[in-house]
Amino acid sequence: MTAAESEILRDVWYMALPGRELKRGKMQGKMLLGQSIVLGRDADGKPFALRDICPHRGIPLSHGKFDGREIECCYHGWRFQCDGGCTHIPSLLPTQKFELSRVGVFQFPCREVQGNIWVFMPEDERTLPDPLPEIPVIPYVEAEHCQMVMKSLFPCSIDHAVVGLMDPAHGPFVHQSWWWRSQKSIHEKSKAFAPSHWGFTMVKHKPSSNSKAYKLIGGEVSTEIRFELPSTRIEHITAGKHHICGVTTLTPLTATQVELHQFFYWTIPWLSLIRPLMRPFMKTFIEQDRDVVDKQQQGLNEDPQLIMINDADKPARWYYQLKKELQQSRLENRPFQNPVPETTLQWRS
């Protein structure tokens, strides 16, 4: 196993794709953590995930046919149920005895939560954790409130993608724009942090004065930002009785490719009216992050010794500490002990 591959946490849930992209009675192949997976939605609307390899001759099952109940391999017509069990091998004669129960395709735990499809990627397929860990839940909103989804591919390891996601100091440099921030707007900031489930939370506070987009919401606005292993960031904005949630998920497709999904949920009716105007701004914001990560790879390819400083890089340190503690607690078969303290961080951005 390479160093990059060892960075990827397993025995955790990863966001596979928005539920709206998987239609009833359809399937699609996808790479997750270097493994080929076929995702489908059966005739009843339930999603499933199987290893995308026919156990007969190794061809991906996603090239076959799916009738909403069974997948038929395109090579020899072997058929598999949505749970991976084999139901039919056409080449067998009636007189030839063969136990179909001997044949199967591994089924990954798969759940649809608040309109998004998550897949559990096990460390050992022979022994799944019982119970399975929780899937991150978005507060105060229902699935039907998901108003906008953005997607981008980042050419980096999951660790560098996550550290970039939680970096509080890059905004005035990477996201320079008239509607967000500029280098001239840099000022001192002080935010309280607290431990939360498998991660940490920047506790509820007023948005930074140099974040112009927040001012469009109007009224008394507050925001809370939560990070949870392996790679989910949830920003919950409260404006009076209304709520806006921006959810960012990072899913490693391979050791050097990470898929970012940005979901926006809101309960403010007028935001839906300006959604076509919002999308280009959000797309630009994500592309700025992707482009700087692409440039970063030029230096990382030489495996340099990197330096982290004081409070601005403390969230990145916490991320690595959280990963280490999760892995260690599992090895020692003990409860997870969150290493993040209640504290206040200060930096300039």
Image (spheres, rainbow, N blue to C red):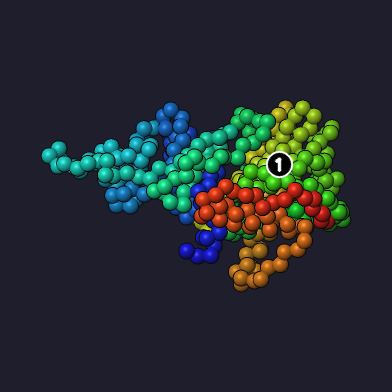
Q: Residue at x 67, y 34 (%)?
A: 139
> Quick check: can you spot residue 335?
yes
122, above or below 238, in the image: below
Q: Residue furthest left?
A: 95
Q: Residue at x 32, y 39 (%)?
A: 85
Q: Position of residue 306 (x, y in %)?
A: 68, 68
> Quick check: can you spot residue 71?
no
Which of these two is toward me, 177 or 190?
Answer: 190
In-image side of 163 versus 38 (left or right): right
Q: Position of residue 141 (x, y in %)?
A: 66, 31
Q: Position of residue 138 (x, y in %)?
A: 64, 36
Residue pointed to by mark 1: 235
In-image side of 331 versus 124 (left or right): right
Which of these two is toward me, 141 or 322?
Answer: 322
Q: Count the marks: how many?
A: 1
Which of these two is toward me, 66 or 165?
Answer: 165
Q: Residue at x 71, y 45 (%)?
A: 201
**Circle 1 Cα neighbour tier, 10 Å, few/some/many (<14 / 14–19 / ≥20):** many
Q: Residue at x 68, y 55 (%)?
A: 318
Q: Quadrant of the C terminus?
A: bottom right
Which of these two is toward me, 188 or 263?
Answer: 188
Looking at numbered disc 1 in the image, what kind of residue is underneath it?
Glu
In-image side of 199 versus 190 (left or right): left
Question: Residue 323 occupies which quadrant of the picture?
Answer: bottom right
Q: Position of residue 268 (x, y in %)?
A: 73, 29
Label 1 residue SS: strand
